[in-house]
Amino acid sequence: MTDDDLAADLAAAAGDLLLAIRAEGTEHDRALGKRGDHEANALLIERLRHSRPDDCILSEEAKDDLSRCSARRVWIIDPLDGTREYGEGREDWAVHVGLAIDGQPVCGAVALPARGRVFATGDEGATRARPRDQLTIVVSRSRAPEIAQAVADRLGGLLLPMGSAGAKTMAVVAGDADCYLHAGGQYEWDNCAPVAVARAYGLHASRLDGSPLLYNCTNPSLPDLLICRPELSEMLLTAIHDVGSGDH
């Protein structure tokens, strides 16, 4: 099985488990999210260790073994991205299964289980959706960064609040938004798989200053990113620079 297929299969399996747990109706809100995180993480780690025993794993829900830093291949996973949305019964949560090789997000899958979708780097004929009439920037529904509103105001765009980072990125992949702009804190597991999928679909992905997104770092903090259609990247990066420097 290829790495692309494995990522897709694992994301789908964890998503099915999370749907089954939520359907039981025995926990709610934070308790449901905690259980979902724990059980989906156990599933992913067990199957990765079985399928790729020589690879390392970095997971939001497991102790970080820094021996990964010297490894070429590291699976970077978030078993339940959007725990709050999952616990509230919403649809905008995801499962992330990504693989970084030499620090680059080369393959991955993002499952949106409540929507019955899995986006993966191995998708055949992956193409971007058509441009929208008005620039739409997808942002966190709980803590939209001020810079996103400033960029939207500068470019005549609008903000679309949403939960999980995976759900937001896939909104751009699917053409429901033009751009995902985030500032204020994330970790590698929040965006490794989404970035891998976005790039497989031909999208631009970088830090807000245009620098590369690097993975399997000693400190897994990755505080900001921009994912958008490539033809918009120069315009958006310029706007981000200008509003960040106070050039309004």
Image (spheres, rainbow, N blue to C red):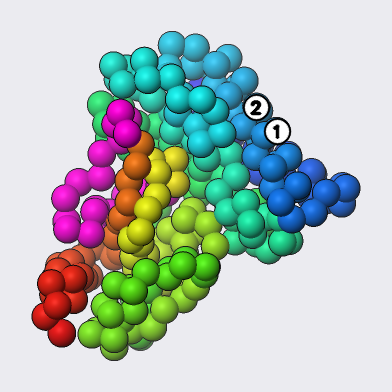
Res. 230 mark: none
Q: Quadrant of residue 10?
A: top right
Relative to 127, does residue 107 appear above or below in the rendering?
above
Provide residue 193's location: percent of width, then percent of height.
43, 43
Viewer-proximal residue among 183 and 97: 183
- Which residue is the site of mark 2? 42
Viewer-proximal residue among 91 and 59: 59
Relative to 16, does residue 171 appear above or below in the rendering?
below
The residue under the point 75% across, 47% down is 31
In the picture, measured across the screen, residue 222 lies left or right of residue 235, that is right
Tag 2: amino acid: Ala
Crowdedness of circle 1 by 10 Å Cα count: few (<14), some, many (20+)?
A: some
- Which residue is the site of mark 1? 39
Residue 229 visible somewhere in the drawing: yes
Find numbered disc 1 in the image and state the secondary structure of the residue it sits on: helix
In the picture, measured across the screen, residue 187 lies left or right of residue 213, that is right
Provide residue 88's location: percent of width, then percent of height.
72, 61
Question: Label 1 vs label 2: CA separation?
Answer: 5 Å
Provide residue 95's location: percent of width, then percent of height.
57, 44
Extreme top residue here? 54
Inspect the magenta stretch and tell me whether residue 146 lies in it.
no
Badges 1 and 2: C-beta atoms under 8 Å apart?
yes
**Numbered range of the magenta stretch:** 191-219
Find numbered disc 2 in the image and state the secondary structure of the residue it sits on: helix
Q: Quadrant of residue 38?
A: top right
The residue under the point 75% across, 48% down is 32
Residue 197 visible somewhere in the drawing: no
In the picture, measured across the screen, residue 19 lies left or right of residue 45, that is right
Inspect the magenta stretch and tell me whether residue 210 lies in it.
yes
